[in-house]
Amino acid sequence: MSQLQWTEWAEQIRAIAQNGLTYCHEDFDIERYHQLQRLAHEMTASLANAPITKVDHFFLPEQGYVTPKLDVRSGVFRDDKILLVRERDDHCWSLPGGWADVCEPPARGAERETFEESGYVVKTEKLVALRDSHRHPYHPRNPHHIIKMIFLCSLQGGEPAVNTEISEIDFFHLDKLPELSQGRTIQTDIELLYQHNTNEALPTDFD
């Protein structure tokens, strides 16, 4: 049995436990759902070779019915080169972006994240892809189930500005891409953006 399958089972157990805790009121059931939650955390810690306290810190603040997390990414071009940012945590490069904020439209979130991570002001032009992260080779796999929204954006202004999360900012040709932070961005994301930048009439790619 593959590690990927065990990770998915742990996610499903965690979701069942959290959904149960959201809706049940019987003390006996609540105790059992907490036990399932603990079991899912222990499985995740074992699979990730990480201490259980780190897994607890990652998951326990979340409440309510479990849904996928939304990651927004921007494809920004200049002179046929695409904007990438270098992540400080793994020293690899990704499309600018991150988690969508509550009460914020995803397109606006992509613009905000791009400005915060790169210093460039952009405008979203179209949704290029809506991707289930489990169906594509993002690696390492995030413990959360993630839906990715990838937008094609136009460059409006600004200038590069590094920050606490980003150490470098640059534009790259498709055939000269740096090492990618593949938990965030994979080459097929960038290839698809290049196609849409050339032909904006292409339909949105979705899972």
Image: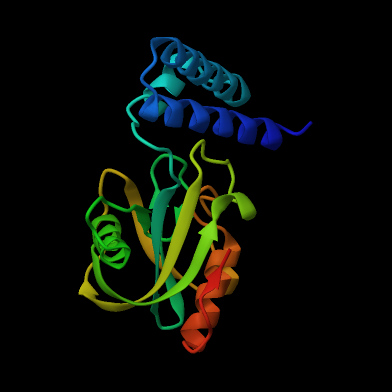
- Work out whether 78 lies above or below 55: below
Find the residue positioned furthest to the right.
1
- Work out whether 3 lies above or below 150: above
Image check: 96 left or right of 13? left
Point out residue 203 in the picture as x, y percentages from the top left corner: 53, 82
- Work out whether 105 lies above or below 33: below
Image check: 92 left or right of 70? right
Image check: 86 left or right of 5? left
Residue occupying image coordinates x 44% and y 66%: 150
Q: Report if residue 58 is visible in the image.
A: no
Point out residue 66 in the picture as x, y percentages from the top left corner: 43, 38
Residue occupying image coordinates x 41% and y 54%: 71
Point out residue 47 in the picture as x, y percentages from the top left corner: 62, 25
Point out residue 131 in the picture as x, y percentages from the top left corner: 53, 60
Quadrant containing the N terminus in the rendered view: top right
Quadrant containing the C terminus in the rendered view: bottom right
* Residue 173 vs residue 126, the one in the foreground: 126
* Residue 202 vs residue 83, the one in the foreground: 202
* Residue 156 vs residue 109, the one in the foreground: 109
Q: How is the image coloured?
A: rainbow
